[in-house]
Image (cartoon, rainbow, N blue to C red):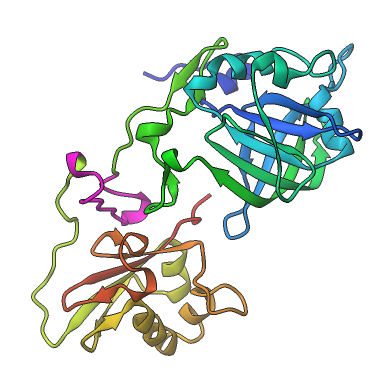
Amino acid sequence: MKIEIDDISKAGHLFYHTPVLITSMSRDGKPNVCTNSWNTRIGYQRPIVTVAVYNGMEEGKRRTYTNELLRENGDFVINVPNISLLKAVHFCGRHSGRAMNKFDAAGLTPLQAKKIRGVLIKECVANIECKGIGMFDIPLADHTVFVGDVVALHVDDEYYDEKTGYLDFSKSNLLIEGSSYSYLKVGDEIALQELPRGVHVYFKEKYKKYDVELPYEKSNMQNNKIVVKFYSDVRGTVGLSSIVMEIEENTSISSLIKLLCQKFPDTFAKIIHEPNTNKLNGSITIFINSIPISMLKGENSPIKKNDVVAFFSAVSGG
């Protein structure tokens, strides 16, 4: 049974955040670090991120030191901690850098950033350098939103899975901020049998303990035919959910894309590539029999008779 909570200030108690360590720098070159859980990315093809930092809007309060530094400099680094830095994460979120060097107090090691005026935290799993490109204060809100353009990435190789391009959750032990200053550890990674709007992922080799049956039934089509499926925004643009196509031997994803561009010059051809380039649109994921081509041979992945190729726009929906 659903119950209604009258105190709307409890909204933030109903979903959880991932705490990171934000590093910034003063005009005279002194680095600072603070814990921040209100952060997100707002760009897919171009990685743009935001962090929300307390602005002292409440009567008798003042802006946080980090807020002041970001207004001065703009650049910042999102440093991703894991459970080994739990005490440092908690400490940096409860003390101000105005009165102390929090790097020394928390036992953290600053490293010079490569492309911005700032520092990384050596002990963190990953570091995301961001060039400040804007900020805004929203009326009634007590946090300033700072916007950063990601310009450099760093990650500890022991936690990075080069095959998927993601952190290996089974090793990285990332944190989630819970309630009342409590923290949770990210649990086991699972393979989803079905993604929204019908696109399935089948990580047979990587996630053997979560093995599932292939969701697509292969038909016994003749004459080297395949099924091409379109999902979410791709479906909306092309105007079809699926088509059957005949292919030649040794056809690759790259060859199939050329055929589809010829077949749908006014729709598919205009969205499959980044503007004015031959680079695939980063917001579109391509699957062969439910396996992402990033886990195969990319655009050179071969297509065989009876295969099912799916084009899925990952940013569709809200």
Question: Viewer-proximal residue, 271 or 5?
Answer: 271
Looking at the image, the residue that sits furthest to the left is: 220
Q: Considering only vertical position in the picture, is 221 above or below 57?
A: below
Q: For this view, does 245 lie left or right of residue 235? A: left
Q: For this view, does 238 lie left or right of residue 307? A: right
Question: Viewer-proximal residue, 60 or 10?
Answer: 60
Q: Residue 98, position in %: x, y? A: 85, 17
Q: Does the segment drawn in magenta span residue 197?
A: yes
Q: Residue 269, position in %: x, y? A: 49, 81
> What residue is at 89 percent from the left and 11 percent from the top?
60
Question: Viewer-proximal residue, 318 or 277?
Answer: 277
Q: Considering only vertical position in the picture, is 162 above or below 284?
A: above
> What residue is at 47 percent from the left and 29 percent from the top?
174
> What residue is at 74 percent from the left and 39 percent from the top?
76
Q: For this view, does 242 lie left or right of residue 156? A: left
Residue 217 visible, this angle: yes
> Quarter of the image holding residue 91?
top right
- Magenta residues? 192-209
Q: For this view, does 263 lie left or right of residue 19? A: left
Dominant secondary structure, magenta = loop
* Quadrant in which the N terminus appears: top left
> What residue is at 35 percent from the left and 84 percent from the top?
255
Q: Considering only vertical position in the picture, is 169 above or below 230?
A: above
Residue 14 visible, this angle: no
Q: How many marks?
A: 0
Q: Does the segment drawn in magenta span residue 87?
A: no
Question: Viewer-proximal residue, 64 or 125?
Answer: 125
Q: Residue 235, position in %: x, y? A: 41, 68
